[in-house]
Every structure is written in C-alpha cells, then in structure tokens.
Amino acid sequence: MANQTASFVGLVSKIRACTLCQSALPLEAKPIVQLNQNARILIAGQAPGIKAHNSGIPFNDASGKRLQQWLGVDQATFYNENIFAILPMGFCYPGKGESGDLPPEKRCANTWREQVLNSLTKIELILVLGQYAHTWHLPHRKGISLTDSIKQNEYKTGTTFVLPHPSPRNNIWLKRNAWFEQCHVEQLQQRIQTALAR
C-alpha cells in the first residue's frame, strides 16, 4: 500500500510539472487536476478555462457552479478530493477559438490518462462531460450523438453517466433539451447521494 501511494504521489507530481504541450499553448503550461486515490467519483471534463487557469482551481467559473447544482453538492463537497477526482481531457488551458475554447491537446490524454485511471481504484461513478470525454471514455458509442448518449443513461445502476458540458455556452442546448434539467438532474442527484452515503 505504501509503495502504491508513493507511486501515485509521484505520478501526480509529474503531471503538475508537465510541459509536454507548451509549444501548442497560448499561456504557460499549468496542469490543473484534483486527484486523490480515495476519490469515489470521477469528473471527466474537457480542459480548464481561463478563470481556472488564472486561479489554479478546476471549474472555478460559471461552469463549476452549474455543475455543483446539477450534482446537488456544495462547494466544500465538490472540492473534497477524497470524494471527487477532477480529470479533464486536457490538463492545461488550450486557448480561445472562434466559438469557445479550443479542443484539449490530445497528447495530454495519450500520455497521462490511462496511468491516472489505473491508479484511481476506488472510483464508483464516472461523470463524462461533453463531446471530447464522451469520445474517449465511451468508444463503443461511436456514431451516437452526445444528446442520445445522455438520454440512454441508466442513473439507478449505471457507473458512467454522460452529461452536457455545464458551460454557459451550452445554454441553447439546455433550452432545446429541457428534459435534461427537468428529469435527469434529479435522478443524477439521487445517485450522487447514494455514492456519498457509502
């Protein structure tokens, strides 16, 4: 157990010091993750936004506030690394594109993701946010739209739940698909509370 813990601490230290994608980034490489081997719920997001980059805190923006509301947890619970692991597809802010932030750098997931997931042995639930995490975590759903994957969630017994990205840029999708917040959020909160109670 001690060797496993030391190995995990070493892995997280390497991640925090990573500059692999520096040449492709608009700002300095600043990996932002929340990781602890005791975590029970994994949030698989996209990449830190500019506010998260500036503060060094994942989801430190309007997306994070909405996500906490969806999950039915307060800020202290959300940032409790013994409960939630936050592992975006790209660990660093990728820069601004024409319609939102640029996609996460693929080299990040290719280099680190399997190692981290293999070390998080207590994860009971994986929350998949947005298209990039959807493609990586659910390759068997290739060709199925993100919206259809969200509709197919099995909240009572499933261990991987697909969610829309909580960004304000997704407000149009949320208005067009009101069923998500009207029906699915309550079911998701019940599942989260069950996991927290154990």
Image: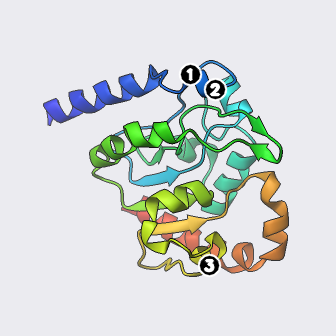
Residue in the picture at 78% in, 45% down: 100
Q: Position of residue 146 (x, y in %)?
A: 62, 70
Residue 125 placed where, x, y %? 42, 62
For mark 1, what is the residue? 22
Expressed as whole percent of the image width and height from the top left, the position of residue 139 reads 44, 66
Residue occupying image coordinates x 79% and y 76%: 178
- At horizontal 60% and vertical 37% (from top left) the residue drawn is 58
Whether the residues at callouts 2 and 1 have beta carbons within 8 Å, the answer is yes
Secondary structure beneath disc 1?
helix
Disc 2 secondary structure class: loop
Query: Disc 2 marks which residue?
Result: 25
Front of the two marks 2 and 3: 2
Amino acid type of the residue that numbered disc 2 sits on in the rendered structure: Leu
**Between disc 3 and disc 1, whose residue precedes?**
1
Q: Amino acid at mark 1?
A: Gln
| Circle 3 crowding by C-alpha within 10 Å: few under 14, some 14–19, many from 20 | few
* Residue underneath mark 3: 148
In the rendered view, tell whether residue 113 sits above or below residue 154.
Answer: above
Above or below: residue 187 compared with residue 26: below
Distance of label 2 from label 1 (alpha carbons): 5 Å
Q: Nearer the viewer, residue 55 or 151?
A: 151
Please tell me which of labels 2 and 3 falls first in the chain. Answer: 2
Rounded to the nearest angstrom, the CA distance separating label 2 from label 3 is 32 Å
Q: Amino acid at mark 3?
A: Asp
Indicate left or right for 4 with 98 as reference: left
Above or below — where is 135 with respect to 27? below
